[in-house]
Amino acid sequence: MIRVAIVGTGGIAGACHLPALAGERHRAEVVAAVDVDGSRAKSFCAEHGIPEAYTDLGEMLARERPDLVHVCTPPYVHARQVVECLRAGTWVWCEKPPCLSLAEHDRITAAERGTFAAVVFQHRFGSGARHLRRLAESGELGRPMVALCVTAWHRDSRYYSVPWRGTWETEGGGPTMGHGIHQMDLMLSVLGDWEEIRAMARRIDRPVETEDVSMASVRFESGAMASVVNSVLSRREESYLRFDFAEATVELRHLYGYGNHNWTCTPPALWNPPDDVPSSHAAQLSALLDAYERGERPPMSGAEGRQALELVTGLYASAFTGRPVRRSELTVENPFYHRLDGGVSL
């Protein structure tokens, strides 16, 4: 059995990670949970039948020696905790955003020594996305030309009463970083690497220091162009992706997760996925555990796990400097490599 520990016992751990693990009970068992709030850790373990509760990550790693740790804590502690787990010889599956900068992500990758850190980007793993990538790679859809990537969500002021939300130091960014990153990652999985971005980001209404809306135009290495919107100001919520290829248009409308019924294709005859697997933590966890059993780098680790953060960094760099930004510019000499606000106030 693969021994699993959960770090952070907030909402995402109970709502998404434990149900996904329940579906893998034939090969994975949860042996411990960690939370800085001891009473919350104990209550979580009692509720879910987890044997051991801890308040210290290092102590848990030393005593339990888990094979895999699910990191479900706020973004500002991800990098430190992921590196600590990797150095203890443990694989990691970390909630998005993986960390607060490309610099932190590269420190995580540098700490991999036969152990790997993957990021939760579950939308790549639904059958609709897998089918779209197969069609695109086979050339059946023709070359990609235009895309729309919209995350129009609504988060009111109460949402930001949680102390770590809405700041550059603890959340790392606004809806670009914390919400739209999922749709942008799915877009990247289909269209590949980008080359240039032109963007704006503004704080229009919410009581935060980050943006509450951003917009960008992106040019990909393939020549395709995309328009990207990220918002937490939208009363009618929707996650929308549209891909215009030379021979077809493929669209996805959902909110927090999709099934095959959320996809449409024009012409419809091209759309025939062989199975119906919803996008979910469960779908990605299955692929992660398969990789663990084979001893191979898991999907959404390393360069794959870095893709969406790289696009987010480019968007913020363009928005803050007021000029186009090329992907090749995001080097260690660039201030946005180290901080997503580049050290500049919005």
Image (cartoon, rainbow, N blue to C red):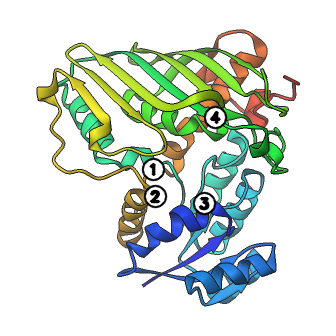
What kind of residue is marked 1? Answer: Gln
Q: Are marks 1 and 2 in contact (CB under 8 Å)?
A: yes
Q: Which mark is residue 12?
A: 3
Q: Which mark is first along the chain, 1 or 4?
A: 1
Q: Which mark is first along the chain, 2 or 4?
A: 4
Q: Which residue is mark 2?
A: 281
Q: Which mark is first along the chain, 4 or 3?
A: 3
Residue 282 vertical placement versus 214 (above, below): below
Q: Which mark is residue 4?
A: none
What kind of residue is marked 3? Answer: Ile
Q: Is residue 304 left or right of residue 105?
A: left
The quadrant where residue 69 appears? bottom right
Q: Which mark is first along the chain, 3 or 1?
A: 3
Badge nearest the viewer, 4 or 1: 4
Q: Which residue is mark 1?
A: 122
At a point 66% along the width and 47% down the height, the residue shown is 105
Tell me the distance, in whole angstroms, between the alpha carbons under discs 4 and 1: 21 Å
Q: Which mark is first along the chain, 2 or 1?
A: 1
Q: Which residue is mark 4?
A: 154
Tell me the distance, in whole angstroms, between the alpha carbons under discs 3 and 4: 18 Å
At a point 88% along the width and 24% down the height, the residue shown is 345
Tell me residue 331's x, y (percent): 69, 30
Label 2 residue SS: helix
Q: Are marks 1 and 3 in contact (CB under 8 Å)?
A: no
Badge 4 crowding class, 10 Å Cα cut-off, few under 14, some 14 to 19, many 20 or more, is: some
At a point 28% along the width and 47% down the height, the residue shown is 127
In front: 278, or 243?
A: 278
Tell me residue 170's x, y (percent): 81, 47
